[in-house]
Amino acid sequence: MEIVQILLVAASGIFSIRFLYKKFLAPKKDKDCGTDCGCH
Amino acid sequence: MSKTINVALIGNPNTGKTSVFNALTGLNQKVGNYPGITVEKKQGSCRLNQTTKAHIIDLPGTYSLNASSMDESVVIELLLNRNDKDYPDVAVVISDIENLKRNLLLFTQIKDLKIPTLLVINMSDRMVDKGISLNVNKLEQKLKTKIALTSTRENKGIEFLKTCLLDFRSLSKVGCLDITKIDEAYFGNLQKVFPDQSLYKLWLVISQDVNFAKIERKKVQDATEYKTQPISHLKRLQQKETIKRYQYINQSLKETYSVDQSKATDYRSKLDRILIHRLWGYIIFFLILLTIFQVIFGWSSIPMDFIDERFTKLSEYTKINLPPGLFTNLLAEGIISGLGGIVIFIPQIAFLFLFIAVLEETGYMSRVVFLMDRGLRKYGLSGKSVIPLISGTACAIPAVMATRNIENWKERLITILVTPFTTCSARLPVYLILISLVIPEGKFLGMGYQGLTLMGLYLLGFAMALLSAGILNKMLKIQSKTYFVIEMPNYKLPLLKNILITVFEKTKSFVVEAGRIILAISILLWLMASFGPGKEFNQAEEIIMSRSKVKSFTAEQLENEIASHKLEHSFIGILGKTIEPAIAPLGFDWKIGIALISSFAAREVFVGTLATIYSVGNDQEETIKNRMKAERKSDGSLLFDLPTGISLMLFYAFALQCMSTLAIVKKETNGWKWPMIQLLSMTLIAYLSALIVYQILV
């Protein structure tokens, strides 16, 4: 049970870091853009 | 098989465009941003019959196709770009029965782009009150289009509009104005060089100040075969175009539209005389604000307390009922507290947007903007900056979002950058505990020192916002047009549906956008406070137990002592110790340093962090206060004395201790440049003012 709890905590941490990275640092493509945006 | 047609709703501001959009789409709508810029993109869908669906875009309000703001550029870019996936099969121009003449200018321009164009004349319910009569059939012939007379208030004409949309292929594509009549030589030459292009489209590309993304502007400008003209000449041609269009509109309306003033029952003029009066206008506005903020705080406190209590209970319930362990602790102390930190703001944000929506819907907001414009202009702000600056006292996040209706980019940017100086509600718990710690309870002219200090901090926030705006106005070299045009719409009773949709959309935007960030940071902060390197952290219990003084401690005191020791040697504790040399000149120790770091996510975390550090439950303010009062520096003197308290309050007054504000500024300015400048400069101002004041007072 303890291992499951540790794994869940680790997963939460990783997801938080991944989310913040994707939100603020990773270059992103606008899914809602037209053909004029230059990201296609 | 079902087919979909693209419909663009276009119109002057305040013509009820969004009401028509809401009437057509109901809740089948989504809000996003146009790529690369931060103008809101609203789109929705509507079933026209069994086989046909309409994809509807509510384009930003614009007075003409001569763009002066980012919102207006969006409209032109879409209408000029056939390759855009949203390029309309049919354009629906929304006009208002009372301002038909002015609204038709945009209609004639869009029709000249050879897009099937339908005219909606909205607010038809006001015709009787205003003494207006209209011959719809004759006007349809004159304008070579189909007209739908609607009233979103009375829900009339929407079904007919849907029928017209279904039948859009029968709409005439004949334009209103022969553009060559403006200057035959110039336009004749232009047509020779680009024989396959629509002449009016070419003219729009040439005459706009805005830089269209990939539309053929450069190609047109670089064409050496036709004689290019100086800007002044182009402007003269633009004026001639407008005059020709109004001649056409006047001619069309002459026999079809009339207003009999004697039949009008008009309250507008009477109300305007009071509401934009040089003295009464300000007094009434001030009283309305006072009422709104009293009501916001009054009404919000009940649901906020309720949410707070529920989340505390949920946290306790989780701890008791789930198997003990690390994840249960994360869930109870990190995730549930983090979620609570988001949800607790919903009532305030919802109430604030409710009042803003009511003021906008009634038409009063335009009067406020007009009233304030003169005073704020010398600081580089516009009348429209009033709303963000005032809403900033509740929360900077919706306030920054509220800057979207400022057309001028420089004014909008300055407003975004200075709004976080206004005292938001998250600063309040910080101020309250510090004031009660370091400001004496005496009175001055019947008013308590503590209350006066709090008022002073609010005023300081506004003063700093204005001062910074003035400096930024001098420093920023952004070229943008600075004229001020504001529509004075008629006063009307607000539509409940529109208000509820606005409140829902804005609140959802806050919860989803800022909420996810706050939650992720809460998890990381919890992790950093729950783990640490080395013996001091991992063997905290043994170390504390070996101390002789703990023998007299109760079980609770002992637990607090261990938690305190662990926190000191956790990763976040080490971080606090690391920054201590930098903050020591301000009168802060490493524990305050931890609170500064953890409250970077949100200011209100400050009190909670100190509560943990000083080993007491965070809902017993008196106890926290007493413990903070008793806290001593290494030399034995009180930690929270007057110099440290004032220094800390000043730091919080000026520093941008709010991750969500940073995130929203990043979203609104489309990059990291401005939020970083804002973060660094506000932190520097906060640091220097705290340093100077502490060094003077100590």
Image (tube, coloured by chain):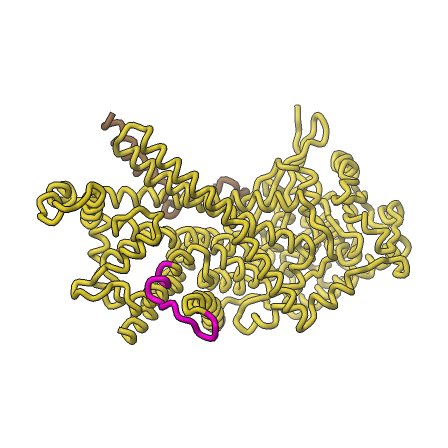
Chain colours: A brown, B yellow
Residue at image location 81% in from the left, 48% down from the top: B124
Q: Is residue B210 above or below residue B447?
A: above
Drawn side of residue B696 relative to residue B283, left or right? left
Residue at image location 27% in from the left, 42% down from the top: B527
Drawn side of residue B643 relative to residue B634, left or right? right
Name the one closer to the observer, B170 or B448: B448
Q: Is residue B109 magenta?
A: no
Q: Is residue B288 above or below residue B337?
A: below
Q: Which quarter of the figure has residue B689?
A: bottom left
Residue B320 percent coordinates (x, y): 32, 31
Residue B633 percent coordinates (x, y): 20, 63
Residue B77 percent coordinates (x, y): 60, 51
Q: Is residue B436 magenta?
A: yes
Q: Range of the magenta residues? A: B433-447
Residue at image location 28% in from the left, 57% down from the top: B628
Drawn side of residue B13 relative to residue B119, left or right? left
Name the one closer to the observer, B538 or B666: B538
Name the one closer to the observer, B536 or B257: B536
Q: Quadrant of the N terminus of chain B?
A: top right
Residue B407 in view here? no
